[in-house]
Image: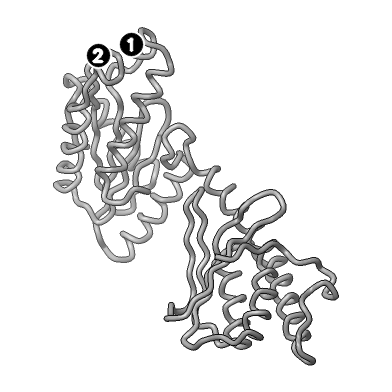
Amino acid sequence: MRTLRPLPIDLVDTPRLPSGELSLIDHLRLQLTLALQTSLNIEELLAIFSKQVKRLFGISGVAFSTAEPELSARTGETALHHLSYRLCTADEKIGDLSLYSRHRLSEDDLLQIEVAVSCMVYPLNNASKHHNAIIKAHRDPLTSLGNRRAMNAAIRREISRASRHHSPMSILMVDIDNFKPINDNYGHAVGDKVIACVADVLKNTAREADNAFRYGGEEFVVLLDDTDSVGAHIVAERIRQRIASLQPQNFGIKHPITVSVGCATMLENETICELTERADNAMYLAKSGGKNCVCAA
């Protein structure tokens, strides 16, 4: 994998290209600069870049990925021949950019492609930072689950989808039982460890990892798309059992770790607030009914 950093803006410093070809690269620079001015969307940047390199070099597809946080975007099709570049600025690694071709590329093509790829360093760097900022704004730092802002956006999206397709949607409100004594007796570090462990159970139990959210404190919400009340109760009971099987001694505590779960399935024309309130009320019924149990609204 070749490591590439941005080339100087002054095109005199770029590799010497055959007569008439420099203007094509210059045009590509211009296209990418305009793209950055109008979009910080990685997929859109890849689409513009892919269109240009397909026209210039017959590239069939382009892919971009980062490790932390994990990100993967692709446009076009993969092929037998491929080139991989690690994009870096002077201070940090941005990610890996791969180009695919159905035919073997000439040395002249490779030289020009390197210039073209270097044009993507700053646009992808800015787009990646923008993407990461959005992710952080929607993630709970302790559990890596979506926060309440992400939850509201996801529920709005799923309510719209469920209404269009006339499919059921349910949510679970999950609350850790007797959490205050854990914090008071063993300290917040242990409490945080319990919260993070419960979050892992939710991530591993929900059908989609992005369907679990930290609602606040020791409360969580699990969004179940295309799930009726019977299915929601099954998932809720599975979550309850898996958390109840956690070993307290692994956390250095004597208190059992359990949760109370409230289920609610969306009613026709129901709002987000109404749906979450019903799930919350069902969760409090589970609390008042002895805890470590599941109740449905």
Q: Secondary structure at mark 1?
A: helix
- Residue 177 in view: yes
- Residue 267 in view: no
Amino acid type, label 2: His
Q: Quadrant of residue 160?
A: bottom left
Q: In what quadrant of the picture does the N terminus appear?
A: bottom right
x 57%, y 64%: residue: 42
Mark found first going from the N terminus, 2 or 1: 1
Location of residue 91 in the rendering, given as x and y in whole percent from the top left corner: 70, 49
x 43%, y 42%: residue: 146
Along the viewing direction, whichever of 36 and 8 lies nearer the viewer: 8
Residue annotated with mark 2: 255
Q: Secondary structure at mark 2?
A: loop
Location of residue 283 in the rendering, given as x and y in whole percent from the top left corner: 26, 30
Location of residue 217 in the rendering, given as x and y in whole percent from the top left corner: 41, 26
Residue annotated with mark 1: 181
The answer to the question of whether label 2 and label 1 lie on touching residues, with beta carbons closer than 8 A, is: yes
Amino acid type, label 1: Pro
x 32%, y 46%: residue: 223
Q: CA distance from mark 2 to mark 1?
A: 9 Å
